[in-house]
Each structure stands twice: as structure tokens, then as C-alpha cells.
Amino acid sequence: MKELHQHDGAQNLLAQSVAADLAALVAEIFGEHPMLCGFSVQKRSTLTKERAIVPLQGDLCLADLAVATWPGFRATREFYSEIACMLLELMDEQPEARDLLRGRTFARTLH
């Protein structure tokens, strides 16, 4: 029984570590891109072609990217790809992050 509790504790620590790394990465993304209002990570099969911006790993896709800038500005594919690359790096380093990203929307916090 003690082994089971140790295993649960280790899994919990890993989940907390992945969640903390994801939170830090999202903060970094918003910090590097002040015009970014938000984005989501969704299953590709649930998205229309217009919402699916950049494929990630497996069935995941960067979607619903919103920016606040001057009129007429459109975010470039390079902008989308830079955010996708940051997310992909985390998923490569910590595969558990995929489950935390799936179906989530991330929005800039205003204080």
C-alpha cells in the first residue's frame, strides 16, 4: 500500500511540475507578444478550416488566435508558427503537457 501512495505522490509532483512549466510558458508567450490577446489548443477534428491555424502534435491544433493591434494589421504565419514552436518544444520536453493543453483557451490577464 505504501508503494501505491509513493507512486501517486510522484505522479502528482510530475503533474504539478508540468502545469507550472505550462503556466510559465504561457506567461512567456504573452510577454513576448504584447499584441496577443489569446489563443486555444483544440482537437483538429472539432475546428473549421478558418479556426485551425497551425497543426501541433497528433490531433492538436493552435486555434482562435486573437490579437489587438492597429486597424488592418493581420498576424502573419510566422507569428502563428512562433507560438506553435514554443508549445511544441514544451510537448517534446514533457509529453504530459499535451493533455493539459487539449481543449484549453489561454487569454491575457489584465490587471
Image (cartoon, rainbow, N blue to C red):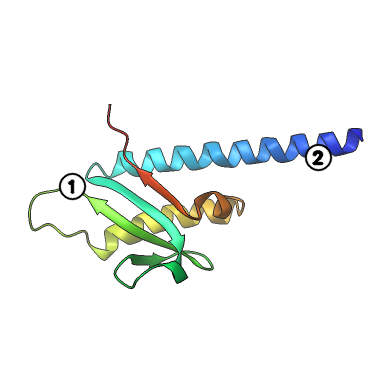
Residue at position x 36%, y 67% from top? 52
Mark 2–mark 1 Cα distance, whole angstroms, equals 45 Å
How busy is the neighbourhood of tag 2: few (under 14 within 10 Å), some, or many (20 plus)?
Answer: few
Location of the C terminus (image quadrant) = top left
Q: In which quarter of the image is residue 76?
A: bottom left
Residue at position x 27%, y 31% from top? 110
How busy is the neighbourhood of tag 1: few (under 14 within 10 Å), some, or many (20 plus)?
Answer: few
Residue 91 position, x and y percent, is 54, 54
Task: Residue at the far top: name it.
Answer: 111
Residue at position x 31%, y 39% from top? 108
User: As shown in the figure, which amino acid type bears the numbered disc 2?
Assistant: His
Res 68 label: 1
Nearer-the-camera pick, 84 or 110: 110
Seen in the image, is 72 located left or right of residue 39?
Answer: left
Seen in the image, is 71 located left or right of residue 52?
Answer: left
User: As shown in the figure, which amino acid type bears the numbered disc 1?
Assistant: Ala
Q: Earlier in the sequence, mark 2 or mark 1?
A: 2
Q: Quadrant of residue 95?
A: bottom right
The residue that mark 2 highlights is 7
Q: Label 2's element?
A: helix
Nearer-the-camera pick, 67 or 82: 67
Residue 39 position, x and y percent, is 34, 52
Residue 35 position, x and y percent, is 22, 45
Q: Label 1's element?
A: loop
